[in-house]
């Protein structure tokens, strides 16, 4: 990377808030859009999470699905279309008329908006099979190019190969490994990839596993939590953060907790790079 954000040297432990806006604020505005991030900020979010894929011409853009069909007025694979083609799609009308004309943003545009709104950014790497290195490289290059204009960042993925590539390219950027069901060998995976955060489906989390992760010195973030009763239960069990489509409701459930907590656990591994 040509230059690094000054707040990202060797990976500093990300100071995540209790509530992170999922895909912006996916129940309040079209997901993975700049409008969604503005709405998340207005609702009180300190961080947002969003998904990144590569276009046919190698530009990282925000889209959860491999295809455009669900969240735009276009069809087809993201990876098969150029940025210019993707930018003609309407990513807002499907959600509500007030968002008509909302565009799919590039990763750079999303990060710059987060900086302007003082939002932390959890960048989730998505990739079609065989494309893990390319998207990891594109994310690393974008972060490096932005330099001091980059917000606080955590890069995460369900794809170990993408995280391994990203670690090699940008070892100083904090990383998180995502699981649908946390396997028995989760800690070996986290150590190998130098991850500081474990992300998991809240429906499959059990108290014993939560305790083990916390005792091992990791931050645990649960997705996707839209029930305030469930959120309070997860916080009581030791979950550090939850991703929510309705962050305004879940923020109320986390009232009284520090917006950003100092780390009190032990270091999960030695040299992160």
Image: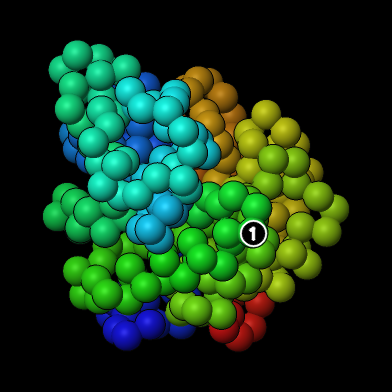
| Residue occupying image coordinates x 47% and y 77% | 170
Residue annotated with mark 1: 130
Farthest residue toward the top?
97
Quarter occupied by residue 245: top left
Question: In the picture provided, is 221 more to the left or to the right than 200?
Answer: left
Quarter occupied by residue 198: bottom right
| Residue occupying image coordinates x 55% and y 75% | 167
Measuring from the top left, give residue 6's x and y in whole percent. 28, 80
Measuring from the top left, give residue 176's x and y in whole percent. 56, 59
When the figure is inspected, residue 125 is found, relative to residue 172, above or below; the finding is: above
Question: In the picture provided, is 102 more to the left or to the right than 59?
Answer: left
When the figure is inspected, residue 25 is found, relative to residue 136, above or below; the finding is: above
Question: In the picture provided, is 93 more to the left or to the right than 123?
Answer: left
Viewer-side residue, 36 vs 218: 36
For the C terminus, the image quarter is: bottom right
Question: In the picture provided, is 103 more to the left or to the right than 129?
Answer: left
The answer, for residue 243, to whether it is visible in the render is no
When the figure is inspected, residue 202 is found, relative to residue 138, above or below; the finding is: above
When the figure is inspected, residue 81 is found, relative to residue 191, above or below; the finding is: above
For the N terminus, the image quarter is: bottom left
Viewer-side residue, 78 vs 217: 78
The answer, for residue 158, to whether it is visible in the render is yes
């Amino acid at each position: 990377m040509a230059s690094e954000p000054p707040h990202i040297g060797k990976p500093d432990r990300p100071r995540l808030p209790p509530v992170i806006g999922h895909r912006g604020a996916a129940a309040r505005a079209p997901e993975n859009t700049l409008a969604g991030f503005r709405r998340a900020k207005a609702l009180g979010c300190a961080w947002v999470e969003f998904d990144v894929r590569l276009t046919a011409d190698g530009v990282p853009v925000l889209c959860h699905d491999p295809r455009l069909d669900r969240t735009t007025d276009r069809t087809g694979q993201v990876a098969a279309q150029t940025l210019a083609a993707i930018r003609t799609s309407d990513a807002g009308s499907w959600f509500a008329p007030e968002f008509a004309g909302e565009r799919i943003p590039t990763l750079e545009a999303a990060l710059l908006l987060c900086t302007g709104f003082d939002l932390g950014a959890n960048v989730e790497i998505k990739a079609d099979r065989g494309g893990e290195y390319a998207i990891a490289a594109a994310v690393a290059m974008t972060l490096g190019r932005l330099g001091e204009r980059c917000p606080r960042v955590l890069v995460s993925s369900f794809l170990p190969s993408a995280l391994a590539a990203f670690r090699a390219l940008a070892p100083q950027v904090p990383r998180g490994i995502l699981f649908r069901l946390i396997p028995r060998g989760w800690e070996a995976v986290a150590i190998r990839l130098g991850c500081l955060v474990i992300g998991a489906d809240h429906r499959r989390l059990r108290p014993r596993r939560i305790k083990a992760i916390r005792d091992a010195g990791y931050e645990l973030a649960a997705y996707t939590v839209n029930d305030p009763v469930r959120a309070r239960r997860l916080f009581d069990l030791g979950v550090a953060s939850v991703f929510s489509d309705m962050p305004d409701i879940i923020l109320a459930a986390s009232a009284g907790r520090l917006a950003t907590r100092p780390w009190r656990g032990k270091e999960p591994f030695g040299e992160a790079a």
